[in-house]
Structures are given as C-alpha cells and as structure tokens.
Image (spheres, helix red, strand yellow):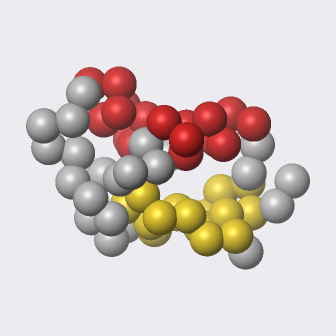
Amino acid sequence: MGKVQIIQTRSIIKRPETQQRTIKALGLGRINKTVEVELTPQIAGMIAKVNHLITVKEL
C-alpha cells in the first residue's frame, strides 16, 4: 500500500459525533493540519466517511 497525505480543510463544529471521532482517529482536529498515513482498507474507509471535510493527496 502507498502513503497518502490528508489535510483537514473544514471544521468539525456541528458535525455528527461519528464524523468528529473519525477525524480525531485520523490524527486531525484543526483546519490545515496535515498527516501522512499508510493507505490501508481501514484508512480508506475513514477517508470515504469524512471526504467532505478533508483533502487527500497520494505520495
């Protein structure tokens, strides 16, 4: 699996609790925070769940 860079682009204020927990589990929490993670099926599912709040770039 490859690595991806995930950038939080929108706020989690007034979002459902499950989306807030998913953002926290990805290691995000603030706008413009960036993390690099290995793209596994679990991470891909988390990305799909909150794709309207983040931007994803393949490395």
At x 33%, y 65%, the residue is 9
At x 68%, y 33%, the residue is 42
Position above or below: 56 against 42: below
Q: Quadrant of residue 58?
A: bottom right
Q: Residue furthest bottom?
A: 59
At x 55%, y 45%, the residue is 47
Judge by depth and name the residue closer to the eye, 10 or 23. Answer: 10
Judge by depth and name the residue closer to the eye, 12 or 29. Answer: 12
User: At which x and y percent is residue 21?
Assistant: 36, 31
Q: Quadrant of residue 44?
A: top right
Give the side of residue 37 with respect to residue 10, left or right. Answer: right
Q: If the image is split into quadrants, where does the C terminus sit?
A: bottom right
User: At which x and y percent is residue 36?
Assistant: 61, 64
Position above or below: 53 against 40: below
Give the side of residue 14 with respect to residue 59, left or right. Answer: left
At x 14%, y 43%, the residue is 13
**Can the viewer see residue 28 in this picture?**
no
Q: Residue furthest right?
A: 1
**Can the viewer see residue 47 in this picture?**
yes
